[in-house]
Image: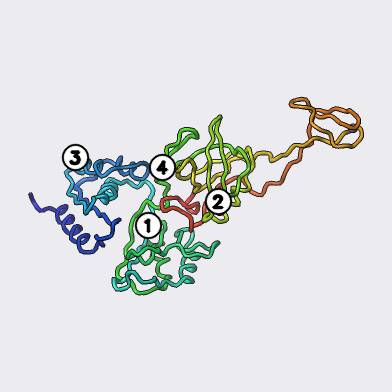
Amino acid sequence: MVNGPVDRVFDIACDMVGSLAHISHENTNPGVVAVETRPPPDFYYKTVRDFCTIEEAIAILEATGARYKGFKNGRGLIGATAAVCSVLPDRTFEYLAYRKPDAFGTPRSVDRHSLSDAETSTFPHTWDTFDIENNCVVCVPHTPDPVLFGVRGESPSWVALARMQVDSEPTEIEQIFVTNQGTDAHLVEGEIGSLTEGFSYRVTGTVCAFAQSGIGGHVLIEIGDGDQKVRCMAYEPTKGFRNIIRALWPGDRVLVTGSYKGGSINLEKICILTLSPAMTKRPPVCPSCGARMTSAGAQKGYKCRKCGARTKDPQVTFHDRTITPGWYEVPPIARRHLAKPLCRGP
Ligand code: ZN
């Protein structure tokens, strides 16, 4: 076989992975894939929206004539195959700063005020560096990996501009990557009553009842479509977003996005399409004697137990709404990588 550019790239990548990966860690199972021409994007969409196996990845690689190597259990071949298959109709950028090897495993030193300043001065062109509302650093991982921090944004120049403002420990290398983060690439259109476990959806429905707050701070609300209902959850880490859910009224029309797990949609965003009139009904005051009337039975209106008067209509009270139609999202600290932040548009 001629040792062409694909072979050279493949050999270099395999050497790098072999020498740098912490291969002894049980969850480290890298994969390296090099192709001459991009395979169809179907496998990429399957990895972000569905479930995939190593065997499926290998079948595509064999059919494409790719060079590939799976280390240990080969699980990394799924991501590597998805990467070479990927098409990014929408795309974002991430500026990754990597630690010096001698710092691996030690606490990261990144000045939080500089991160807050970087967020403030470059938002909405960058996002999820610092959660201003919750006063919390978002872009610095807590896992023992070599990444010091990552800045996500619309363009290489915006992420670089934000990075310039960050004060930190010295870095080994820095690199800007094209990504599918913040693009909602994982979402598919869904219908209440026919959702599949593990998929992430965009679903429209009507609020069935007021939200319930549970132990641990989660908020649960049911939305329905016809006879079908689905539970939607806003967990404690979604902080102030839960107040939006608590402010919903039965009858509000909403579009929600999130992953469907354990029979619930874990909310990422909600669009309030229309607000219900938000009215409550109670028996009226008797027009004759002024006493509070009582129900005369289903569909029978109201009667006065004092003077016997009857009336059809209840007393209706309209309530002020504290929310307005439009989009709402979980805060940066609770956002999944693929979820598109509202600063990029709905
Ligand atoms: Zn009366």
Q: Of discs 1 and 2, which sits in the foreground?
A: 2
**Residue named by callout 2:** 218
- Relative horizontal placement of residue 44, taking residue 122 as reference (left or right): left
Pointer 4 residue: 198
Q: Which residue is mark 3?
A: 63
Real-space CA distance between mark 2 and mark 4, rounded to the nearest whole angstrom? 20 Å
Mark toward the viewer: 1 or 4:
4
Dot 3 falls on a residue whose secondary structure is helix
**Residue 130 point in image, percent of width and height:** 48, 63
What residue is rendered at 19% in x and 50% in y? 68
Looking at the rendered structure, the kind of residue marked 1 is Phe
Which residue is located at x 47 percent, y 52 percent? 341
Crowding at dot 4, Cα within 10 Å, few <14 / some 14-19 / many 20+, comes out as: some
Amino acid carrying label 3: it is Ala
Occupied quadrant, residue 47: top left
Give the CA separation, mark 1 to mark 3: 31 Å
Give the CA separation, mark 3 to mark 2.
47 Å
Residue on which disc 1 sits: 93
- Whether ligand 1 has any atom under 8 Å from the Cβ at mark 2 is answered as no
Q: Tag 3 or tag 4, which sits nearer the N-term?
A: 3
Q: Earlier in the sequence, mark 1 or mark 2?
A: 1
Crowd around label 3: few <14 · some 14–19 · many ≥20 (10 Å): few
Q: Is 258 positioned to the left or the right of 83 in the image?
A: right
Q: Secondary structure at mark 2?
A: loop
* x then y, percent, for residue 274: 61, 40
Q: Is residue 65 left or right of residue 102?
A: left
Q: Secondary structure at mark 1?
A: strand
Determine crowd level at label 2: few under 14, some 14-19, many 20+ residues with C-alpha closer than 10 A.
Answer: some
- The secondary structure type at the circle numbered 4 is loop
